[in-house]
Image (cartoon, rainbow, N blue to C red):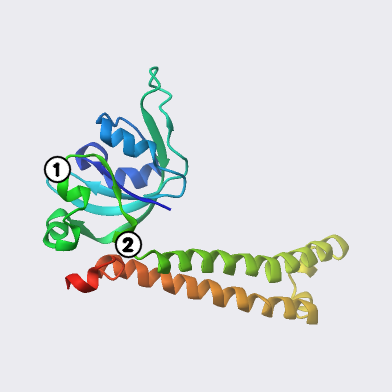
Amino acid sequence: MAYWLFKEEPTHYSWDDFVRDGGTQWSGVKNPLAQKHLRSVRKKDCVLYYHTGNEKAIVGYGMATTDAYPDPKDKSGKSFVVDIPPIRKLKRPVTLAEIKSKAFFKDFPLVRMSRLSVMPVSDREWKEKLLEFSFWAMNIGLMAQIVLSLLPVGLLQTVASVQEGYWYARSSEFMGQGIVQTLRWMRMPGDTIFAIGAIAFVIFAFGLRFGWSLKGSESDS
C-alpha cells in the first residue's frame, strides 16, 4: 500500500462535499508531474485530503478503490483519474505550518513543491506495522465470527424456520439448545481478535493526532 496527498481548494470541493458525495472520481489534474503521480495510484492506496487556500492543512484521508485509469472525458487519452471514497476525518487538521516546523519533513514534497496537487508520501514517514496489524486483525476477527458462529447459527435457524416456523427459530427454546449455545460461544475468539484490531486502529489514529504514527517522530520531539 502506498500513500498519497491530494490537494483541493475547499471553496471548490471541500472535505464535507467529499463526504456528502460518498466519494469522487479525482480528475482535472493538469500538471505533468502531478499527473504522473496520479497514474501511479493503485487500488487500496491511502490518500490524504489536503485543503489549500487559507486553510493549508490535511483534514482527512480516503482510500483508492480503483487503480488509476484513463479519464473517459479526455479524448486524447493522456489524462488519468482515480476513484476514492472518504474514510475518516482527522480530529484536528494537520497544518502546513506544523509540518514545516518538523525538520524530519524537510524533504516532504508538500514542503519542497507546495503547489503540486498530487504527491507521494513516502512510507518512511509512516509506521505501517500497527495499521497493517489492525487491518488484518479486524478482518480475521470478522471472518472467524462468520465461519465459527454467525453462519452456522444462521443455517440452523433457516432449517428450524422451514421445519417449525419462524417464531420457533427466534424463540428462547431454540436459542437455548446446547449446540446453539456452543456456536454462540464460538463467536468469542473472533470478537476478541476483532477488538484487538480495533484497539490497534484507535492507537494508530491517536498517533496521527499526536505524532506516534509518523516514523522519526521520536527523534524530532
Percent x, y for residue 83? Answer: 42, 39
Percent x, y for residue 105? Answer: 19, 58
Kind of element beneath mark 1: loop
Q: Amino acid at mark 1?
A: Gly
Q: Is residue 29 visible?
A: yes
Q: Nearer the viewer, residue 105 or 144?
A: 105
Circle 1: is it few (<14), some (14-19), or many (20+) Cα within 10 Å?
few
Is 98 on the left-hand or right-hand side of 138?
left
Disc 1 to disc 2: CB gap under 8 Å: no
Kind of element beneath mark 2: loop
Q: At 23% across and 69% down in the image, what residue appears?
A: 217
**Residue 76, placed above or below residue 124:** above
Q: At 40% across and 17% down in the image, what residue appears?
A: 75
Q: Amino acid at mark 2?
A: Trp
Location of mark 1 (residue): 53
Q: Quadrant of residue 71?
A: top left
Instruction: Give the label on residue 127, or none.
Output: none
Percent x, y for residue 97? Answer: 12, 56
Instruction: Give the label on residue 126, or none.
Output: 2
Q: At 26% across and 35% down in the image, what residue appears?
A: 33
Mark 1 / mark 2, whichever is N-terminal: 1
Percent x, y for residue 45? Answer: 41, 49
Give the foreground label among 1 and 2: 2
Q: Residue furthest right?
A: 163
Circle 2: is it few (<14), some (14-19), or many (20+) Cα within 10 Å?
some
Q: Is residue 25 visible?
A: no
